[in-house]
Amino acid sequence: MPVLVADSCAEGEGRVHADVRFDASDISQSGAFVRSSLLFELGELLRLEISLPGEPPVRVKARVARVVRGGSSGESQSGMGVEFLDLDPADRARILALVR
């Protein structure tokens, strides 16, 4: 499921302001796993736009709760677990309908 991170990301000592597209898996009402080799810092706050099939996108603020580097600890896929922080109840219901 496509996810747009509409935020800035760290690069060296500065920050780069850009929108970055990722692919999400394991989406739930409380968060998702975002597959990527570009990893944000643990605890970093992001603004996400999640594309739902046949629906308007879900926009939500999220926090990076877990960072996984592929090949470490038996993990094969690099990415980040993100926790939704301010998910609107209507959007929560749309995600729930999708994952059922």
Image (cartoon, rainbow, N blue to C red):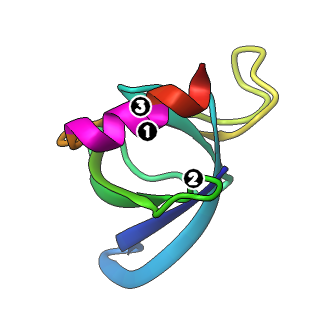
User: Distance of mark 1 from mark 3, alpha carbons?
Assistant: 13 Å
Tell me if 55 is positioned left or right of 76 in this view: left
Please name the residue shown 53% across and 72% down the image.
20
Residue 83 shows up from this direction: no
Q: 40 or 5: nearer the eye?
A: 5
Please name the residue shown 53% across and 52% down the image.
39
Vertically, is 88 above or below 5? above
Q: Nearer the viewer, mark 1 or mark 3?
A: 1
Q: Amino acid at mark 2?
A: Leu
Vertically, is 34 above or below 51? above
Lower position in the chain sequence, tag 1 or tag 3: 3
Q: 67 or 46: nearer the eye?
A: 46
Q: Amino acid at mark 1?
A: Arg
Could you say where residue 14 lies in the image, as x and y percent from the top left?
30, 80
Residue on which disc 3 sits: 31
Tell me if 5 is positioned left or right of 45 in this view: right
Q: 32 or 73: nearer the eye?
A: 32
User: Distance of mark 1 from mark 2, alpha carbons?
Assistant: 9 Å
Report which quarter residue 77 is drawn in. top right
- Magenta span includes 1: no
Residue on which disc 2 sits: 52
| Magenta region, residue range | 89-95
Q: Where residue 94 is drawn, which disc sits there?
A: 1
- Magenta span includes 91: yes
Q: Amino acid at mark 3?
A: Gly
Tell me if 79 is positioned left or right of 17 in this view: right
Tell me if 48 is positioned left or right of 75 in this view: left
User: Distance of mark 2 from mark 3, alpha carbons?
Assistant: 14 Å
Residue at the outermost bottom position: 17
Could you say where residue 42 lies in the image, as x and y percent from the top left?
35, 39
